[in-house]
Image (cartoon, helix red, strand yellow):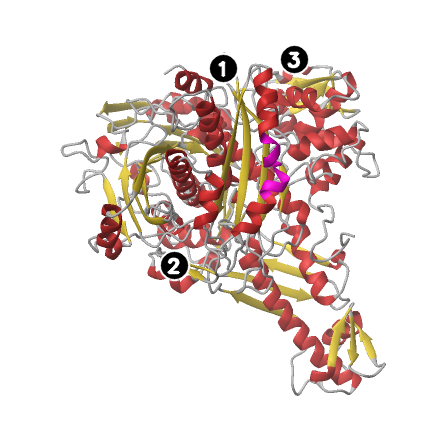
Amino acid sequence: MPKDTGIGASPKRREDVRFLTGTGNYTDDINLNGQAYVHFLRSDMAHARINSIDTAAASAMPGVVRIFTGADFEGVGGIPCGWQITDKHGEAMQEPAHPVLAQGKARYVGDAIAAVVADTAEQARDAAEAIELDMEELPAVIDMKAAVQEGATKVHDDLTSNLCYDWGFVEENKPAVEEAFANAAHVTTLELVNNRLVANPMEPRVAVGDFNRATGDSTLYTTSQNPHVIRLLMGAFVLGIPEHKLRVIAPDVGGGFGTKIFHYAEEAFCTFAAKALNRAVKWTSSRSEAFISDAHGRDHVSTIQLALDADNNFTALRTDTYANMGAYLSTFAPSVPTWLHGTLMAGNYKTPLIYVNVKAVFTNTVPVDAYRGAGRPEATYQLERVIDKAARELGVDPVALRRQNFITEFPYATPVAVEYDTGDYNATMDKLEEIADISGFAARRAASEAKGKVRGLGVNCYIEACGIAPSNLVGQLGARAGLYESATVRVNATGGLVVMTGSHSHGQGHETSFPQVIAEMIGIDESMVEIVHGDTANTPMGMGTYGSRSLAVGGSAMVRATEKIIAKAKKIAAHILEASDADIELKDGQFSVAGTDKSLAWGDVTLAAYVPHNYPLEDIEPGLEETAFYDPANFTYPSGAYACEVELDPETGKVSIERFAAADDFGNVVNPMIVEGQVHGGIGQGIGQALLEAAVYNDEGQLLSASYMDYAMPRADDLPFYQVDHSCQTPCTHNPLGVKGCGEAGAIGSPPAVVNAVVDALQSMGKDITHVDMPLSPARVWSAMHE
Amino acid sequence: MTKVSMTVNGKAASGDAEGRTLLSSFLREELGFTGTHVGCDTSQCGACVVHVNGVAVKSCTMLAVEAEGAEVATIEGQAAPDGTLNTIQQAFQDHHGLQCGFCTPGMVMSTAALLKENPKPSEQEIREYLEGNICRCTGYHNIVKAIMAASGQDVSAIAAE
């Protein structure tokens, strides 16, 4: 029987009621007294010199409060980058200034040039149209390889080139890797593109800045995955506001997927303008604006090579990647193609020698940063595609080739700097073969053929590094932040608990799953635990939610704080029961003295903590409230095996996903319903990347797919029901819950499964096709069929 | 500015609107029904679906002045007065048919319209009907399942939510 409470149960989500009744509190639902509205005038040229901005006519328009330009921000800091990469020569990456409003030049379509603040949003928009801009269009650099050619137009005049960094990893391994390739029995080479995507959380970004002149306090309401990070970055590096005078609130947030991690200029603007005008200032992004101002994701061009010996053992791997940074460095952009990508190139395999080169390139496009999976999908896609290609070249079963090369002993130190603690890749592959009914594929293929369709099967594995991350390690790797998480557990006199967590929920269901953990630890009902998050004024400094880290890191902090609570409560109970602390046991919400019938209820002890009449005041303080900061000892390493079956329509080239199965190992699972929902959503986005989505720029730097009319979001009829399983569980060894994280797996594991399946289908038609770049649109697949 | 009056969830409501004010903005900004969400500006995402005189409408495709005198139903009026969720809302909760909740009001309102015209839709009919409602979180699996359950169909054979 499934449990109905505590760890392993699937209680209905408590946050759902407000979302289902229209009573959620998203940032755009917040309206402050007397607020003004800002509209940003954005560049419609990818690269242009700003000769002059004439705001006279616009300023005289109805309702206009003030128009700001770059000149108003000359004395203000720029948007900081949170990660510094050291290149293969030991030099720091090139890091351009990133002003709040453009200074002198616009560097991508969407770069904000001026900001109009007016009494209404419509007045601000109208006035922006009356601003007279004198802009001189300059040649734009869009293609990454062209951008790093000698003599290319520079995105930033003060940098030596458009190369942000040239990273080699592990540089010392390079000669041994070369030697292994020279001695290989077989080398498989694959060039591929990891298509540029737009994260597209359904809630567009919103910021509301407020200022209280009486106290000098600033407040920012924003659509963020990590309000404390925004407070630190914006306060310390942009606006010079100390943290005790700045409050950042991220209330209900309508999806993030990475793109709401970053500190954006619009947040700084609204906070700055509210103080300058002594009036709240609100910005609500339109979807069209989101396409040209939210950080994009992926956009890698790679060449990967796999070396094998005569027995088909992987002997070496090397990969060269061009990674687009866009026009400026978004908050964590430099880390994505490096430490979140290079360190995953071993995948599930015992390849002994690996060398990764990444050239990060500035172009006149929207900044690119983390999107669900962030670096790990790019690594997995390269690796799982090249293995599939190798299997086909060698005429061996792709699954057997994988199994032959699986890592089977743990802990396992990879040649790319990480140590996997646990995993069982054969177990997840066995489970996949079962739930995907791989043995029934031949019959299904025959059935497809009988109705004139072409069926293909794609299988792949993935591993990811989650639970980001040990602070001392990421510090060595260039992070300008620690990556711990925090929790304060406050027990009230009558026994209820409030957990104030630095993690942030924007769809993940923390309000439901976190109480399950505490209920299990104390033996009380989940309804006695409330979760508070998203407001820097009432939660301890936390690093927020991304990298599938909430439960592994934030949940661990909550466990540590609750352990302190239980230890103190036992002391109180021991005093009242006149026993030794060591003899007190806590079970089902009752403290008892081992070996006796003496016991005390949870509520009696919590009341004693706040009414300390009979209390060990000489030893411990009254009250029951504890804080813990948890810094993980290692990443966690979720893994799994995915299978996709597609049908191609030979008439049109349209690919339809007929079956999709995912067997994941997330370690222990707190709420299976939520975990499965996370996997479903990740798979939906991964299939979206594989079949539909692409942020496409033309040579002039215009984003051609800048609305839902042009950017193909996956819709209900593009996707099937999924078969997902998480029964293979090798618990994480270094966090107290044994959990690994599940938020990104689906988006990491699914694109190669889809592409492997389509290539399989094409080859079954007798086509000598070894690769088609994503998205596998009907036009691309039809062309491949007719080559 | 024009004064616009309508009935929202059975109660009279009125406010000022410019000629260009969309019904979605009027409901959110002027009348305070912030459960209706705006997720795009090309009438694609469906987060703003409400019912106007019993018909599902993307409220960003309609001017507020066009709704003068209309009966409008929004997500805020779907549960019973005591807060009990309606069948569709309850099915979405039971089957984890929502994550961040932003597309949810439109999904619930579109589902209500679907079930009115097709009380027992097939999986394929549901998927096709939801063409105009985008969800980025769920991969649609549990939404489709919830709608099948809300229409009284046995969903036990569909993979777990």
Q: Position of residue A76 (x, y in %)?
A: 32, 47
* Disc 2: which residue: A474
The answer for which chain carries disc 1 is A
Please count the marks in the image.
3
For marks 2 and 1, the one nearer the N-term is 2
- Residue numbers of the magenta segment: A432-441
Amino acid, disc 3:
Glu
Quarter holding residue A327: top left
Label 3 packing within 10 angstroms: few (<14), some (14-19), many (20+) = few
Image spot of residue B80 (x, y percent): 83, 34
Q: Which marked residue is nearer to the observer: mark 2 or mark 1? A: 1
Residue A38 position within the rendered picture, expressed as x and y whole percent measured from the top left: 45, 33
- Residue in view at x 25 percent, y 27 percent: A140
Left or right? Give the position of A581 relative to A696: right
Q: Does residue A63 show up? A: no
Q: Is residue A397 above or below residue A168?
A: above
Asked whether the residues under marks 2 and 1 belong to the same chain, the reply is yes
Which of these two is toward me, B43 or A31? Answer: B43
The one of A604 and B115 positioned closer to us in this rendering:
B115
User: What residue did someone put label 1 on?
Assistant: A650
Q: Amino acid at mark 1?
A: Pro
Q: What label sits on residue B66 in the rendered view?
A: 3
- Mark 1 lies on a secondary structure that is loop
Predominant SS of the magenta segment: helix
Compared to residue A525, the image places residue B134 above or below, namely above
Q: Amino acid at mark 2?
A: Val
Whole-number angstrom distance, CA of label 1 to CA of label 3:
47 Å
- How many residues crowd mark 1 within 10 Å: few (<14), some (14–19), many (20+)? some
